Image (spheres, rainbow, N blue to C red):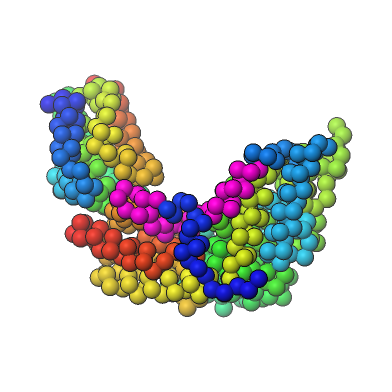
Amino acid sequence: MSIEEKEAALIEDFSIYDDWMEKYEYLIELGKDLPLIEPSLKTDERLIKGCQSKVWMNARMENGKIVYTADADAIIAKGIIALLVHVLSHETPQDIIDAKLNFIKEIGLQEHLSPSRSNGLVAMLKQMKLDALALNATL
Amino acid sequence: MMKVGLDIEKIRAEFPTLRQKIGNYPLVYFDNGATSQKPQVVIDRISRYYEQENANIHRGVHHLSQISTDNYEAARKTIQTFIGAKHAHEVIFTSGTTEGINLVAESYGKLLQPGDEIIITEMEHHSNIVPWQMLAKERNLQLKYIPLNDQGELKWEKLEGMLTNKTKLLAFTHISNSLGTINPAKEITAIAHKNGTKVLLDAAQSLQHTKINVQELDCDFMVFSAHKVFGPTGAGILYGKEEVLNEIPPYKGGGDMIKSVSMQQTEYNILPFKFEAGTPNIIGGIAMATALEWLDELDYAAIIEHEAELLHYATERIKEIKGVTIYGNSAQKSSILSFLIDGFHPYDIGTLLNQQGIAVRTGHHCTQPVMEYFGIPGTIRASFSLYNTKEEIDLFITALKKAINMLQ
């Protein structure tokens, strides 16, 4: 599936929930499926700055595609990073760099997370794109 | 006018922001430590200024400039009376607490010599730490901290032993923004003065909860922000004793702070203008006075009683929740409830409370040394104001239980 297709599928998944509680319960569930970063990689260098909770992330290349792993010490932050990892992982660096990621708005994450928290989301996304840029340069 | 109790419903009706829903939930605003909401009278004062009075002050001979100047200077007098200052020119308009502290650090700091000492506390907001660290580095001063205890109180008994003939300033907060602890400002000031040490009181968290009289406290400097006392953002006060303000140099150069300027030199203006360079936040100052007048019409004793009741009720109710730890357990405590729930991240709790219309603050509250002392990254902070109610605390506890339920 392409990034856009994965986004479309997520938008559809979220659209069945009209209640914030169901939406957040789903987000919390998604967090449980997050491909976890190896404990030895949970270093300060892999901490994403700008999040209120601790979020660690790693990016590595596998057959020309990036595989992200991550972890967070807050459950909702873990759900959000899981969404981003689900959409961007196993894609080429160039596709990740070019991704518009309109789904964030569509599923109401930006609208429902206050600015300081959505900065956390922005910081996560920025780190993922920076990793893609760095790995793209090694190709 | 006789002041009898507080009619909370009547007061709430004066705050338009409180009458709204967040999603399907009524707003419960418990982030008063960060900023207060504004009564209609303050909002109207701001509109009226821009609709009818706007002009620059201290400069024009024209009608509007005179009205603006008169209102701005009348505001200074109102604030002087409110804080109990001896003279109106001891009241310096600033952009807020942070600027007030930076002004003193920059200006009073110029009189300090290498090796001189400043004492602050482990309880301070970053705005009462960083300017002193910067100054200490620049001028080679020693910065000392009064330590905390497990109740979230300061070990003031250590102060006398820490004071030396080189201690030029003691800067401390009246009320802790992250723990709620009320410091005995008058007694501490007296101890410092016996040593000849000047005192700066950070009153950012005080005036909305308790009456302050600077002459009674005898502090040399006192700073606060209008926006935490029902006034607008971007305005605040530095109070300084006349003799101290006359002794210290200007802070910023520009218009209004001068008597005369030639290409060789400048003769500085008298107090308070010496410290007020450039066009100030005119309506900020005027509306701050409106807010304080509004507050002054209420019964302070009743405010203190009401807020103590809210704090007591919230403290009792939150103990219903398993694994809760309250940070800040001083007997002298303002209406700030800082807590953590074992096994739950404050960010998760804060996010799910927000979904239910409850506004709290999560994080370190700009007091990282406090968090370091307790070995925690941050807390959830509910801070109550005079317009909050027990019913809102019930909504908060219900929402908190629901959040915990979802995160389990």
Q: Position of residue B383 (x, y in %)?
A: 44, 62
Choose top left, top right, bottom left or bottom right for residue B398. Answer: bottom left
Above or below residue B394? Residue B350 is above
Q: Is residue B62 left or right of residue A99?
A: right
The part of the chain drawn in magenta is: B20-49
Q: Position of residue B248 (x, y in %)?
A: 77, 54
Choose top left, top right, bottom left or bottom right for residue B259. Answer: top right
Q: Position of residue B79 (x, y in %)?
A: 69, 59
Q: Nearer the viewer, residue B178 or B400?
A: B400
Above or below residue A88? Residue B186 is below
Q: Nearer the viewer, residue B193 or B286?
A: B286
* Residue at x-position 38% and y-position 57%: B28
Q: Would you say residue B183 sits in the magenta stretch?
A: no
* Residue at x-position 41% and y-position 75%: B312
Above or below residue A122? Residue B174 is below
Q: Nearer the viewer, residue B283 or A116?
A: B283
* Residue at x-position 35% and y-position 55%: B26
Q: Position of residue B217 (x, y in %)?
A: 68, 71
